[in-house]
Amino acid sequence: MNNGTGSNVSHPEPLIVSVSGLRGIVGKSLTDDVAAAYACSFIETLPAGPIVVGRDGRESGPALKKIISKAITASGRDVLDCDTASTPTVGVAVIENNAAGGIQISASHNPAPYNGLKLFSEKGRVLPATEGDAVRLRFEAMRRTPPKTQKECEPGNIHSIESTLPHLNKVLAIVDVDAIRRVNPKVWIDCGRGAGSRLALPLLEALGCEVTVVGEPPDGQFEHEPEPTAENLIELLPQIPAARADIGFFQDPDADRLAIADGTGHYLGEELTLALAADAVLKKSQGPVVINCSTSCLTVKIAEQHGSSCTLSAVGEANVVDEMLRRNAILGGEGNGGVIDPRVGLVRDSFVAMALILERMVEGGKLTPLADLIKDFPPLTIKKTKLVLPSGWSQSDITESFHRVAQAFPQATVSRLDGVRVECDDGWVLVRASNTEPIVRIIAEATHEQRAISIIEQARKALLAQ
């Protein structure tokens, strides 16, 4: 088994703290004391009420859940324990139980030695930037000067709750279940030894699918690197046609992202997940859609075809949700396979994505192969790369390099929503600095692969020009 202990974690990383949560290598940067302090910093910012706690399938999850639950109950609050649950399930549980907030213990797609905490507000969504920053500042202050004594209070209690069934019912309510059942699609799914297996099989069986499941149980014993990319899934793809499946689904460990492959085992990726989900929703009702500015414009073009608008947000799930609420959007998401349907919750949700794509495939009472569904989609190719920043570069150096990128495309439209985004007649490029690493990410899209590659190269040269 591949437990994700390859070269990408041979040099221990520092603790990564962002506005939406925290992650690190368990026992090294992420210790019990760090997890407890971060949980306490979070709950101090919340209104009164219980806290939902869940975890993905990682081996370190049970111990971290015990530490975090102890910290929460010591503060006088009750814990609503989902135990093993997907990230979107935790978001639903916060709403269903009128909780003050939630904590999901997960490192998402990071390798097995990692774990982390993802924070939810009382609205069942990832914390907005302002609230997340307040938690970060409290946490950093607590690490600098730990409190000498803890205030005395009546300890809270831990209550186990059923979180899967309410989530299942919400997903079933947004699609025509009978239409999918009549066609009886054959589905192959890899749950990646993550929390997705708790809901994936019940959902697909409720939709009347004939299901082949791999990547069970949710024990974190990853059989491939956990991010659902083509490179990581190459050995699994032949299993899809071998199972005579109509579609293949791949979840990441906390099941907020979904990658897809067609019945031949051809990997279609994550960008198409959102585009297909948008096509399914917009065929039934018009309304605003929101994606982040690093996502393929395929969803923009599909929204336009349906007479709807598609707005770009800054990168990050919280930013997408903020813009969705401003626009009263009927769907949102990111090109990493994260689909957000507010009818279910304000969290990226692989189960929503599966249900919507299956509904689209059975439209008209017969199964339409994925290849036929996407053959009329606008031809676009997206390319992504990253550039390690030269040693000693300051924030002003980065700012100046972004200015050079904008100047390198004189006839283009420039946006500073997030980094610098340049939109040409035949494509676009986004250049943005990582919040956690000394790198710049460059993403470009065009109607032809070679043009996307040349746009990236043009941006790269401008970045490094002195």
Image (cartoon, grey):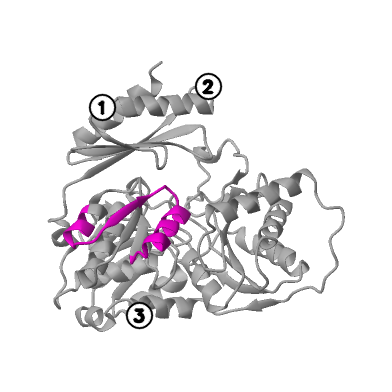
- Considering the numbered disc 1 on the image, is that residue within a helix, a strand or a loop? loop
Q: Which quadrant does the C terminus fall into? A: top left
Per the image, the residue denoted by label 1 is 410
Please tell me which residue is depicted at 61% across the width and 61% down the height of the picture: 61
3D distance between C-alphas at marks 1 and 3 = 49 Å
- Considering the numbered disc 2 on the image, is that residue within a helix, a strand or a loop? loop
Per the image, the residue denoted by label 2 is 391
Give residue 455's quadrant in the image.
top left
Q: Amino acid at mark 3?
A: Ala
Nearer the observer: mark 2 or 1; the answer is 1
Q: Nearer the viewer, residue 267 or 304?
A: 304
Q: Is residue 16 above or below residue 189?
A: above
- Residue 339 seen from this side: yes
Q: Nearer the viewer, residue 244 or 462?
A: 462
**Residue 401 at what x, y percent from top left?**
41, 25
**Residue 432 at what x, y percent from top left?**
42, 37
